[in-house]
Amino acid sequence: MNDLNPFLEISERILTQSKNSKNKIYSIHAPEVECISKGKSHKRYEFGCKVSLVTTSKSNWIVGVQALHDNPYDGHTLKDAINQMEKIVGLRPKEVYVDLGYKGKDHHPEDVQVHLSNKSRKKITRWERMWMNRRSAIEPVISHLKQDHNMIRNFLKGKEGDRINAILSAAGFNFSKLIRAFFAISKILFLHRFYFQFESCSFHFLKNLNFSGTTS
């Protein structure tokens, strides 16, 4: 009977909850699932938990990832995301570029300059404009995490499973980049070595080639 108590409690919450209730149950077997408003016409809502992601501006390496529960406001997660990045890579960024979800100076770290993507382009420098354009490069990273590295659906149980799945997805993405870089370098080294061997053989062949008589 004790094993059924959690399910009985969940069933009671499902029966008593209404449209405007807070902390509603959307899944019996995963009660931690939340409804997240996306604000998009083709997909208004998603179900699961939020994931905070930090990537480098130049090469799109993932340097920070966190699964966030209780559907927090994006701006409230910025300090924790930057602190996690500092623990992982040992460096603290001087500037970060974020979308509108992070607006609100009260939530921004004092020692980090935060740039919002909606800032008027006339009031910023050419370099700031360039980095703002680079911010959108995080969108394909998110897409790859969902489609190629299983972040779109988590098969691990509970909130701890959400955290583990987010970390493993980000690690898989970085490992994929490392493997591609390794094979690209290996290919260049192989072609470089093959070219010089071929050039040496050709030179040796021509050097030992003797002609007799004349040609017309």
Image (tube, helix red, strand yellow):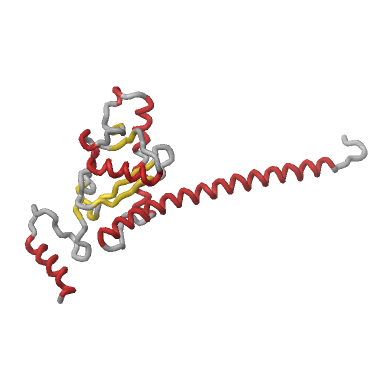
Q: Name which quarter of the figure residue 55 lies in.
A: top left
Viewport quadrant of the N terminus: bottom left
Q: Position of residue 134 (x, y in %)?
A: 37, 35
Q: Nearer the viewer, residue 94 or 150?
A: 94
Q: Please provide percent x and percent y for residue 101.
A: 23, 39
Residue at left 85%, top 42%?
A: 209
In which quadrant of the rendered view does residue 200 lie?
top right
Q: Residue at x 20, y 35 (%)?
A: 106
In what quadrant of the picture does the C terminus appear?
top right
> Does residue 33 appear to the left or right of 199 in the view shown?
left
**Rendered image quadrant of residue 82:** top left
Residue 38's place in the image compared with 216, above or below, is below
Residue 131 visible at all: yes
Indicate the position of residue 85 as horizontal and vertical percent values. 35, 44
Asked whether 139 or 165 is in front, the reply is 165
> In the rendered image of this protein, does residue 5 appear above or below residue 22?
below
2 versus 64 height, above or below: below
**Residue 62 seen from this side:** no
Of all residues, the one furthest to the bottom in this rendering is 1
Total labels: the figure holds: 0
Q: Position of residue 169 (x, y in %)?
A: 37, 54
